[in-house]
């Protein structure tokens, strides 16, 4: 599994998009599935940026926003480990891999964007 650390601002979001594009190209992927844990209002800007990104469009990127309670339940299926962001990411990736999720609709994106 590949990972990247990005800042929590517009530049960091751009770094994440670039990372995803590079990863898709390296793996010759025609499709991206991106899972995020819902974080109240904190993740809406990133989610909306990923859903509407022109750079990700050639890869038919689908973004899935998972309820934190679902993520917590998924983590119980893994051997006992300390609670970490890496474990959360693994649980989210596994849930997206299983499928049967509703992707976040492009027309539901908020009008607010990164303003800083």
Image: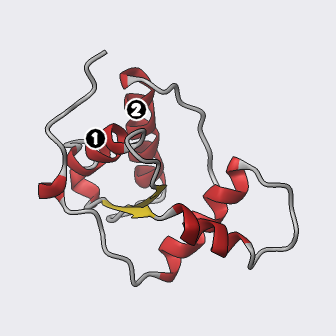
Please provide percent x and percent y for residue 28: 41, 60
Image height of 85 relative to 81, above or below: above
Tally of numbered tags: 2
Q: Nearer the viewer, residue 54 or 114?
A: 114
Which quarter of the figure is the C terminus placed in?
top left
Badge 1 vs badge 2, beta-carbon distance below 8 Å: yes
Q: Nearer the viewer, residue 29 or 41?
A: 41
What is the crowding at mark 1: few (fewer than 14 residues within 10 Å), some, or many (at least 20)?
some
Q: Nearer the viewer, residue 86 or 30?
A: 86
Q: Is residue 70 left or right of residue 21?
A: right
Q: Is residue 90 left or right of residue 48?
A: right
Q: CA distance from mark 1 to mark 2?
A: 8 Å
- As drawn, the label of residue 13 is 2
At horizontal 51% and vertical 82% (from top left) the residue drawn is 98
Q: Nearer the viewer, residue 31 or 69?
A: 69
Q: How is the image coloured?
A: secondary structure
Please provide percent x and percent y for residue 22: 43, 43
Please provide percent x and percent y for residue 36: 46, 55
- As drawn, the label of residue 98 is none
- As drawn, the label of residue 49 is 1
At horizontal 54% and vertical 74% (from top left) the residue drawn is 95
Image height of 6 relative to 36, above or below: above
Please provide percent x and percent y for residue 49: 28, 40
What is the crowding at mark 2: few (fewer than 14 residues within 10 Å), some, or many (at least 20)?
some
At horizontal 59% and vertical 38% (from top left) the residue drawn is 4
Image height of 21 relative to 93, above or below: above
């Amino acid at each position: 599994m590949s990972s990247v650390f990005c800042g929590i601002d517009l530049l960091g979001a751009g770094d994440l998009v670039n990372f995803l594009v590079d990863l898709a190209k390296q793996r010759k992927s025609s499709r991206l599935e991106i899972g995020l844990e819902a974080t109240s209002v904190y993740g809406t800007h990133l989610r909306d940026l990923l859903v509407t990104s022109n750079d990700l469009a050639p890869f038919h990127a689908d973004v899935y926003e998972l309820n934190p309670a679902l993520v917590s339940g998924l983590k119980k299926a893994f051997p006992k480990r300390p609670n970490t962001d890496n474990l959360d990411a693994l649980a989210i990736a596994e849930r997206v891999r299983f499928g049967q999720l509703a992707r976040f609709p492009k027309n539901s994106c908020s009008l607010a964007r990164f303003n800083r």
